[in-house]
Image (cartoon, rainbow, N blue to C red):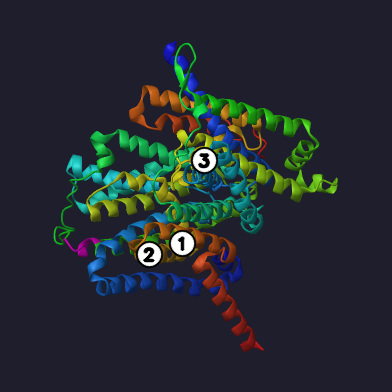
Amino acid sequence: MALSTQSTTGHGQAAAPRRTDRGVIGAAAIVVFGTAGYFVFPDNLALLTHIISTMLLVLAIDLVTGYCGVATLGHAALFGAGAYGAGIAAAHFGITEPLTMTLVGVICGSIAGLISGIVVLRAHGLAQLVLSIAVIHLFQEAANKASAWTGGSDGLSGIMPDAVFGRFEFDLFGQTAYVYGVALLLVTFVLLRILVRSPFGMLARGVKEDPVRLAAMGASVQSVMIRMYIISGAVAGLGGALSAISTQVVGLDSLSFTLSAETLVMLVLGGTGSLYGAMVGTVVFMFFEDTVSAANPFHWLTIVGALLIAVVLFAPKGLYGTAAAFFERRSRAGKGRDGA
Amino acid sequence: MQTVLSIAVDALAYGMVLFIISIGLSVTMGLMRVINLAHGAFAMIGGYFASYAARDLGLGYGVGVLAAIVGTVIIAIPVERFLYRRIYGQPELTQVLMTIGITFCVIGIANFAFGPTLKTIPLPQMLQGSVDLGFRTIATHRLFSIVCGLVVAGALWFLIERTAFGTRLRATVDNAAMAASLGVRTQVVYAVSFAVAIGLAALGGVLGAELLPVEPYYALRYMVTFLVVVSVGGAGSIPGALIACLLLGAIDTTGRYFAPEYGEFFFYLAVIVIVTLFPRGLAGRFR
């Protein structure tokens, strides 16, 4: 929110070159942190890849929740569709080329996005929330029932991706999967960065701020939201495909309500309505989870609960949003002093 | 015919338990416009209190039920005062997050205090065994739940439609600002109805313990079910909630009888159909 007002109305044309700089900084940060992760945690690359695939899901939720203002507790359906799509393509149809598998995941995610968008966007408020919950349960029950295709509750196994470009094998330590993940994340970030600042991205923000006015201006609110849902489905499906390729199994938990709720928590922890917020929230949450839940999973739950309450009460903009607002204020105060 | 009646009886028992727990949620949502995902957590706390009083202290079922209601309401009052009051009138996302946070905390604490095992609430002699209805036998406590559900529905109807407090409550639901300017102390109405809602949740948690077993993940597992009931019935409406409970109970029970391998597929399919057709619930007042 703070970011949206700041970059849309705050500076106008004068800020245009600086905004581009920020995008470059973000892309550079992904490369730097990606490289650092590779060398600092060489034994934990599987966890890092898992974080990247979850991050893609959180970015997808951010697109509909942060930019369009749709409250959803069922977004894992899109992620799971991508994961099962890529997994089934590999296990049943012999499509083991990783880039093709990823593409299949993206397409399946988009289709799931279209379906759940059509359902969820029928209502508002409480009814919308309930519809999103019903969608995720429906997807999960369907996947459980279609066990011939999905392996049911045993999970889908037998996914053996080929080497990337025929050269880089998926090794035991997950090095290839990790590098592949970072590359996907980088590409996605750049594309989303362009998307959210395009006229369409502005339209989506307008839908969140005041749908009635947008409709009066001649924009079709429903079509904007459906399109955003499809794009969001593509991003979530990408995350699902990455998770299927890197772990080589797909379980029913990738279609669970719990995953939907947890990723929403990550988004809010980082800050909605900003790509950085989504990524920061995911990293903080999952590192924290990995450390604490190793000690005791139930203490972890208590801490997440307390954390959520604290964020809602004291930092409603999330970690990134609060920090950004803080630095924005400081720099403005500094400029004021220079001018005087 | 035999099967239909059997399903009807089971559905009725399940629906009534759902009703006792969800009606409180429906009232608070209709009244305070808060999406309270922590409602199931309070029902669970009730179950734990009753189990502790009746099983571990050996005080008997009646005392257990009383302890559950009183204890849960005492816990709920500071939670309402310090956490819920801050999210009245906030966007849905904020309310969802805050109440999910409370639910997670309750789950963690319950597990820490009572362990991850199922807690039973021993039934008194009177409610054990079964009753012959002519076409089938039914466990006595299920009959008891049905009767309790009907009593609760009747008492609430009387409270809301026939008493002075009910008039103030309805006025506040319809237009809080106008009611306040006419001299209704809306803060008191809020507090009392929140306490009643939580008390009913605790009662439902105890009565339904045989159908919805008490364990730490109770709060998360049934959260969605209660929310669905309110959404289908329409927040703030007693007849709506009753119809929704019976309808959803019937769908769920029928699904389990005829297609158990599909799990809750038909339940959620029905929910999507109903919510899409009636976005404000079967009898909603929620805007």
Marks 3, 1 in one chain: yes
Disc 2 to disc 1, C-alpha distance: 9 Å
- Marks 2 and 1 close (CB-CB < 8 Å): yes
Q: What stretch of residues is rendered in magenta? A: A172-177
Disc 3 to disc 1, C-alpha distance: 26 Å
Under circle 2, the secondary element is helix
- Residue drawn at 67 percent across, 27 percent down: B154
Say which of marks 2 and 3 sits in front: 2
Residue position marked by numbered label 1 in the rendering: A303
Amino acid type of the residue tagged 2 in the rendering: Val
Residue position marked by numbered label 3 in the rendering: A130
Amino acid type of the residue tagged 1 in the rendering: Ile
Mark number for residue A9?
A: none
- List the single residue furthest toward the right: B182
Amino acid type of the residue tagged 3 in the rendering: Val
Q: Residue A201, how many percent across, how many down?
A: 50, 56
Please tell me in which quadrant of the rendered image residue B256 appears.
top left
Q: In the depicted view, which residue is nearer to us: B239 or A318? A: B239
